[in-house]
Image (cartoon, helix red, strand yellow):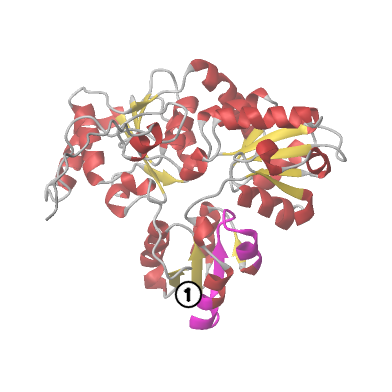
Amino acid sequence: MTTAHPVQELDVQPSPLALLLLGRDADPRSERGVECPGDLPSPSDPDLVERARAAKEKLGEKVFVLGHHYQRDEVIQFADVTGDSFKLARDAAARPEAEYIVFCGVHFMAESADILTTDDQKVVLPDLAAGCSMADMATAEQVAECWDVLTEAGVAEQVVPVSYMNSSADIKAFTGRHGGTICTSSNAKRALEWAFEQGEPSTTKVLFLPDQHLGRNTAVRDMGMTLEDCVLYNPHKPNGGLTAQQLRDAKMILWRGHCSVHGRFSVESVNDVRARIPGVNVLVHPECKNEVVAAADYVGSTEYIIKALEAAPAGSKWAIGTELNLVRRLANRFAAEDKEIVFLDKTVCFCSTMNRIDLPHLVWTLESLAEGNLVNRIEVDPETEKYAKLALERMLALP
């Protein structure tokens, strides 16, 4: 016979991280967001497309919808312009008559749009939980601690920070305060060249945030450095897991961050697709690992990938190492030209945070704005904006 014992009530409170992952709390210094207030339309609502169209039509020129290349087709159809994160932020700044900028992307992209647009414009993110795992890998506190480590090693005065566009406003502001610049995957080489021109070539170093792979690939593949010139700073280890001598000897101090999508591709993926599709051209994004980039035929930014496929001859075969929504869109676009375009990996891999922006969230956002209710505004505080804009302007001034 089993004796029943009373169940003891445990006073267990979820941790702040658990709440963030559940979408039930906010961290203003993190890319993670919160759940949207109010009720979203049902994803099975057959009238979603018409509702989105009607709300956008009602708003007219008051709204400007930006769609990142990695968005789903159901969202892209309502975008006034499409592009990568920086192109979209600049497009928003070029439309001062638009009161509302609806950014169908992720949090750091909306922050950049807010930095570059006027104070009268309001940037809206349809789902506040659409963050970026890469941007989350470098917090303001961690980077400030890293700078202390560099100072203690006696090298901080020789270090120029270069931060990838895929970073939070806080990291961009840190970069601006310390004399650095922002870069995109298209101009990373020029940004690094500029950084090394800021001091003595033999002693100047770059702290590259937050994507180690873009920094390493640009330094080694495009600028002729060696892998030994690069060290990896791990914010989860004392002193970044590096000795003072390693920091003194390095040219590139790479932050231990990566893109969860591009980091999945492997040399095995490349070898497999070459075996399956004879004559295939392998084209990958520079956020991929160094060994994948070395095994590919072509490497370039999202815009580079699109232009390369536009210029490709009919009948050519391509395996693309970037986000799946874009690859599928390009495959459909060029099918009529007999261009075979496949995803590099056998495993399906969307950008999970980018895909949080779906049609129900977009409908809810547009209908709310059409009714005069401002929702999910992304607003960067003036002090952060000042220094983040300074870093962005340094990039804009690059030849």
Is residue 277 among the parts visible in the rendering? no
Q: Is residue 273 magenta?
A: yes
Instruction: Name the quadrant containing residue 66.
Output: top left
Task: State the residue in front, 257 or 8.
Answer: 8
- Residue lying farthest front? 1
Q: Position of residue 27 (x, y in %)?
A: 41, 28
The answer to whether residue 140 is magenta is no
**Position of 367 compared to 232: left or right?**
left
Quadrant where the C terminus is found in the figure: top right
Residue 208 at least partly seen:
yes
State the image coordinates of residue 285 (x, y, percent, origin top left): 55, 57
Identified by mark 1, the residue type is Ala
With 380 as the anchor, is 383 left or right in this view?
Answer: right
Residue 364 located left or right of residue 320: left
Q: Which residue is mark 1?
A: 314
Mark 1 crowdedness (10 Å alpha carbons): few <14, some 14-19, many ≥20: some
- Per the rendered image, the range of residues in magenta is 272-294
Residue 123 lies, with reference to residue 109, above or below; the image says above
